[in-house]
């Protein structure tokens, strides 16, 4: 259902003491991404600074994304939380606003046991909106094991996973265990997109696609056409950008990159802080290699 290149879109904020939403800029960014060949968009993910959005802002961002996409590409809205009741509220709202699916991070900090994870994700999937799990142990402190993912994939509304563990053996086990189901594995790491596609993944939820959507779409397209050499060429062309966008905590570098490209971005919200001058110079140098 959700395949191809899906930018995890930044949330533009205004500069000033309030650091408020920039809905006009958000719509402009989405239009740019769609016009450059992305297959879908992911608002309110980690890259969208969802942890600092109020519920009302969360709702506004999803509503604006659905309206801007206007049915041209799917909207996979981030609705996760470490509080099941809050995640239910976010997911129900995303469904009612017209999102095509929900990206749900595994609960962070509380480190739930296996039965708790099953009940958490099942509660969300029962809301009758397609659910894509999100496994990112570096942020949550807990890894969704392959056998658990395979079990959760039995639910008809759990349709995929964004895998950001960095473990290709784990990715392989998940794909192996779900090959008989309508279930997609998506890369959660730009640099691992190509090797994960080779294992049978269906695409990527991408940070780099915020600033290089056409090249990311070309990488995916080349692989899907069987042009491995072409996909490899684009992968290595983009490799310096993949590294540069993680010279500091995501989304600090990508928001700066978007701003340098003339897109709507604005500052990151505290407790994140702006990219320092030395790292900004590195980012400028890397961005300058892409025309």
Image (cartoon, rainbow, N blue to C red):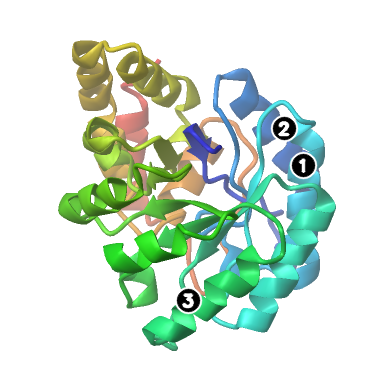
Q: Quadrant of residue 66?
A: top right
Please state the horizontal and vertical placement of residue 4, each as a whole percent of the image: 47, 30
Q: State the residue at coordinates (46%, 39%).
A: 257
* CA separation in Å, label 2 and label 3: 38 Å
160 horizontally vs 60: left or right:
left
Q: State the residue at coordinates (51%, 47%).
A: 255
The residue tagged with tag 1: helix, strand or loop?
Answer: helix
Q: In this view, does 157 lie above or below 100?
A: below
Q: Residues within 10 Å of mark 1 (few under 14, many from 20)?
A: many
Q: Which mark is residue 118?
A: 3
Q: Which of marks 1 and 3 is nearer the N terminus?
A: 1
Please state the horizontal and vertical placement of residue 22, each as a whole percent of the image: 75, 49
Residue 51 vs residue 271, the one in the foreground: 51
Residue annotated with mark 2: 28
The residue tagged with tag 2: helix, strand or loop?
Answer: helix
Residue annotated with mark 1: 66
**In the image, farthest residue toward the front:** 180
Q: In this view, does 89 lie above or below 289?
A: below
Given this view, does label 2 or label 1 mark the residue nearer the observer?
A: 1
252 horizontally vs 72: left or right:
left
**Dots 1, 3 in contact, CB < 8 A:** no
* CA separation in Å, label 2 and label 1: 13 Å
**Dots 2, 1 in contact, CB < 8 A:** no
Q: Which mark is residue 154?
A: none
Q: Residues within 10 Å of mark 2 (few under 14, many from 20)?
A: few
* CA separation in Å, label 1 and label 3: 29 Å
33 horizontally vs 170: left or right:
right
Please state the horizontal and vertical placement of residue 29, each as a whole percent of the image: 66, 34
Q: Quadrant of residue 200?
A: top left
Q: Is residue 166 in view?
A: yes
């Amino acid at each position: 259902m959700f395949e191809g290149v899906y930018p995890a879109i930044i949330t533009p904020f205004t500069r000033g003491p309030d650091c408020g939403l920039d809905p006009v800029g958000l719509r402009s960014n989405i239009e740019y991404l769609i016009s450059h060949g992305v297959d879908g968009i992911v608002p309110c993910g980690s890259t969208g600074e969802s942890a600092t959005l109020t519920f009302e802002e969360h709702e506004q961002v999803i509503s604006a994304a659905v309206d801007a996409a206007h049915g041209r590409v799917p909207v996979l809205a981030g609705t996760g939380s470490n509080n099941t009741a809050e995640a239910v509220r976010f997911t129900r709202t995303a469904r009612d606003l017209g999102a095509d699916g929900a990206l749900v991070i595994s609960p962070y900090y509380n480190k739930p046991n296996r039965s708790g994870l099953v009940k958490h994700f099942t509660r969300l999937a029962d809301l009758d909106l397609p659910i894509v799990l999100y496994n990112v142990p570096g942020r949550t402190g807990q890894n969704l094991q392959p056998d658990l993912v395979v079990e959760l994939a039995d639910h008809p509304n759990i349709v995929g996973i964004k895998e950001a563990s960095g473990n290709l053996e784990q990715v392989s086990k998940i794909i192996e265990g779900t090959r008989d189901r309508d279930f997609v594995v998506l890369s959660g790491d730009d640099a691992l997109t190509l090797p994960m596609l080779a294992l049978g993944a269906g695409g990527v939820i991408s940070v780099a696609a915020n600033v290089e959507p056409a090249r990311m779409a070309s990488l995916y397209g080349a692989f899907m056409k069987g042009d491995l050499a072409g996909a490899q060429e684009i992968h290595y062309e983009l490799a310096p950008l993949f590294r540069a966008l993680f010279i500091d905590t995501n989304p600090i570098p990508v928001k700066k990159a978007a701003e340098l490209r003339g897109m709507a971005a604005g500052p990151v919200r505290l407790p994140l802080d702006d990219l320092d001058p030395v790292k900004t110079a590195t980012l400028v140098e890397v961005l300058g290699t892409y025309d």
